[in-house]
Amino acid sequence: SGQTLTLTRTSGASVAAGTIVELQVTGPANPGQTGATGTAEFATETSSGARIDERTDVAGTTITVSPMGTPTSVEPPTLQGLVIGGQNDGINVTVTTNHTVPSNGFVTVQFIALAGWNFNATGSAGVSSSNFGATSLTTTAAGLVTVRAPSGIAADSTAWFVFSDTVTPPGPGDFDSQPTSTGTITVTTKAPGGTADINQVVLAALSVRDPAGALTGTSIRPVLSGGTAKAGAVGSVEIEFRNQNGLPSTSRFRIVFPDGFAFNVGGTTAPSIVAGTINGGLLVAETITNNTVVVAMDGTGISINPGTVVRFALSHVRNPELSISSHSATLQAGRSDGFVIDENTTVPVDAIVTNALSSVSLAYASGSATAGADTNVTVSFTTFNPVPRGGRLRVELPNDGTRSYVWNNGATTQAWFANETVADGALSVVSVSQPNATSGSNAVIVVERTGASTAIASSASVELILSHVRLPQVSGTAGTFTVQTQSDVSGNALIDEGSGTVASVSAGNIAVGAGAVALANSTRGANTTVTFTFNVTNPVPASSRIIVGFPPGFSLQPSFTGVALAAVSGGATVSTGTAAV
């Protein structure tokens, strides 16, 4: 009865004095609380109840915590629902007890310790619902939440409760990735007073991950010049996105631009809202470093509803100083403490095209502008963007099918700068392409700066000299030539380019000697044959013309009997056909 168990021997012999007796009793339930049990009592009696021996202060034992029953769980398995956009769906804890939790007992939930996370230590974490009348008691900064069970919890029953506002993410932050961890939550039931454990379970694999939603409709439009994003242009860039989750009126936007963009150029970079998207004020919240700009809403506007098109501009930005066909940026939207709400790490940035070289011209060495001459050519231009120390210059001279230029004429074409205070270092020829009469391709040369100490500055007046260039072998102008500056990175990406019209060349010289004009019959008034002997500088094509100017007094009216052409080479005369007047 009560705590006393009386056993009657039903078989066996008498037990001699001094014998050690071992008694096993199967079936009793341990106390429902952990800790020492207190003292026990042993006694022997006669069948009529008279005591033989007794001991009332036998040392007891210690009761340890027992595991929870199943199922036991904590939902959601991640903490995403707690922190995204300030929306809190709560944490649902479900346990099955093996033993009774007395009235005013407790359930504690110990979260894993995560660096940078703040557990609510103000006591405001509330139990929103439960099936055992749970009330919130305390929440500690170390992540221990204690819940009271006023009515207790019956043994072998499933108990659940939902509580919220327990944890907040790291802050203030710099939009770095949020902690990503796995760990455990320990749930324990306790006796009144909270010192003795009853049941306990360790829930494995609680994960904490970046809860960011997706920014869509994202784009970054570089500085426009004449409606085009040109290399090195200075002005305003425009950022656009559509948010997935609601954003507060104190949101921050972090933009990581691709390499090459520069800020605070010609003034201080500042944000401004593009009309018709969001309201309030914007400001640059942090020092701009490593192509990263953080823009903050100043709180004077309203919060941003999900799905809103947000567009703002940044002033005094310079585009990369080279052409880029494809590049991307990272864009994040978050709270004022830097916690990321939505993001997109592959925001397309509009292509950057070349800017324009100015004052582009081409000149021939003095006195050499005649057809077929071997000469030095000076290509002059003014840069828009700098040309790096290892940059390249590309010159393309025209070919109109009749007139073309040839490199390496008589000797290898060399390249150098006329003024090394503007552009220093040696130049090496990287490649040469000769013109092709069949395809109509132009003459192209590419030279590279080697050994230069500095970049060629923007707005620099450059004179590039190219030697041993054969001019077109027909007088006139061949048309338009082009010049390009190229980077030393990104496959020698183009920087600037420009074009101009090549200078006209005059006719080449015909050399003559004594007896250049000979008459077969020199009698006055007689019809005769006239032989003209001359040396052409440039080749004469088959479908060409020959102009002969007779001295005054010759009559060209009588019928011609024919015109014969011959070439003299090595003393031998070889017929080269006939000509018609």
Image (spheres, rainbow, N blue to C red):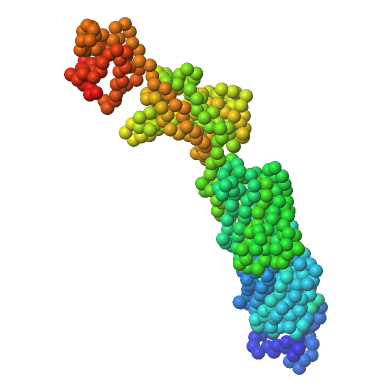
Whole-percent x, y for residue 312 in the image: 65, 57
Q: Is residue 77 visible?
A: yes
Identified at 61% across, 63% down, the residue is 309
Identified at 25% across, 18% down, the residue is 556
Please state if 71 lies on the left or on the right of 408 as rendered: right
Using the image, determine if residue 532 lies above or below residue 467. Answer: above
131 or 337, nearer to the observer: 337
Please state if 328 lies on the left or on the right of 167 as rendered: left
Q: Residue furthest bottom?
A: 48
Rendered image quadrant of residue 161: bottom right
Whole-percent x, y for residue 158 in the image: 65, 81
Quadrant showing the C terminus: top left
Identified at 59% across, 46% down, the residue is 225
Identified at 55% across, 48% down, the residue is 228
Quadrant showing the N terminus: bottom right
Please state if 410 lies on the left or on the right of 196 as rendered: left
141 or 394, nearer to the observer: 394
Using the image, determine if residue 402 lies above or below residue 162. Answer: above
206 or 545, nearer to the observer: 545
Using the image, determine if residue 468 lies above or below residue 353. Answer: above
Using the image, determine if residue 49 lies above or below residue 480. Answer: below
Whole-percent x, y for residue 526 in the image: 20, 10
Q: How many numbered callouts?
A: 0
Q: Is residue 40 visible?
A: no
